[in-house]
Amino acid sequence: MKKWFVVLLSLVLVFTALLPASAAAVTPAQKAHLHFNDNGKFRILNLSDFQDDILLSDLTVEFVKQSVAKYQPDLIVLTGDNIAGYICATKSASEKAIRNFMEVLEELGVPVAPVFGNHDDEGGALSKEEQMDIYDDYSVCLAIDEAEYGYDLSGVGTYVVPVYESAASDKVKFAAWMFDSGSDDGVEENDNYDHVHADQVAWYEAESARLNAESGETVYGIAFQHIVVNEIYKAFNEVEKGTPGAVPYLGKWYALPDTASADSYLGEAPCPSYGNEGEYEAFQRNGNVLAVVCGHDHANSYVIPYGGLDIVCTASCGFGSYADEACRGARVFDIDLNDTSKYSTFTYLFTDIELNSVLLKLEYRFINFWKQVYLLFNNLWVLLRESF
């Protein structure tokens, strides 16, 4: 009997070793078991573009703390450019920049789902894989290096955060889809941003089918990434040059459509990739993604319906990056268990918070002035470039 037992145990161990990592390992998001509360509500706070270095702005920290205290989110999503990689010239500087804001978020105790932006690994001091190892040190972080879970995908940090029906239920009722939209497209003559690639799209479709099958119904969700999808210019209205509120892009002028949310704001021309490998079409085809939410364009904030789902931009909340005072802030998403095929969203502006410190008030006036100046000259440069 003992001999047969050893043989059987050996076979079990061999079979387990042959299983893909994704089948054997449980992700931090699954372990966290995020769920709708007793009132059937789930809230996401979306913060974008901290884009700071080893000296994280006190204003950014104050805004994050007040946002969490006021809105009590169940999940915080960071939509990229979490650090300014182009300033952090060494590994230790990049690590310090990450730990600065992650220590704040760890103290707040709310689960955090970050994705990378084009500036996070710019400069090359720390690769995305190395950065993910640092994020993993924090108990609130739900992100993964998908390669460690058996997925060979473009980029680092494409994963799903399931939201369960209740604390006692294992039924997934909603999903936050997290995508690494890359940095640049690698084509030197383009000097252009990257996008979500075909292998990531295929992963989403497979995971979507799995969640639907396990749940026995359509699991709706919201997709989050850094770089805006290039369908945004199809969602805009093409207008005459010089139309008030319009922005130039590739020789044409665009404005917000009438269908945009009332609080939408267009402070600069969005910068999508020239490339497109079918991400948005996959969302349309599957019918379970309600919105694709991006950061990247610091001075923009909008919700625009297009082709059966929404394109959403969340403005920068960080004072390491430029932004427009009219929209600098965060975005809140609310989902109701009674109808997960819908969501509601609103923005919370930096100008809505109370700065009780005289030093913070002075810091705000000084930094905001120079960030506004930078935005002005950046937009003037775009206008000049588009004129030739």
Image (cartoon, helix red, strand yellow):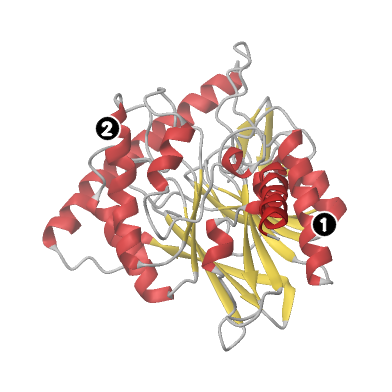
Dot 2 amino acid type: Ala
Q: Name the quadrant of the C terminus.
A: top right
Q: Name the quadrant of the N terminus.
A: bottom right
Local secondary structure at mark 1: helix
* Sequence-earlier tag: 2 or 1: 2
Residue 117 percent coordinates (x, y) = 51, 38
Residue 236 percent coordinates (x, y) = 71, 46
Residue 344 percent coordinates (x, y) = 63, 71
Local packing at callout 1 (Cα closer than 10 Å; few below 14, some 14-19, many 20+) is some
Label 1 belongs to which residue?
209
Considering depth in this image, is 125 or 358 the residue closer to the camera?
125
Please report the residue visible at 59 percent of the width from the left and 12 percent of the height from the top: 188
Local secondary structure at mark 2: helix
Residue 63 percent coordinates (x, y) = 32, 61
Label ID, residue 251: none
Where is 70 relative to 116, above or below?
A: below
Dot 1 amino acid type: Ala
Label 2 belongs to which residue?
93
Considering depth in this image, is 260 or 319 the residue closer to the camera?
319
Where is 37 relative to 204, above or below?
A: below
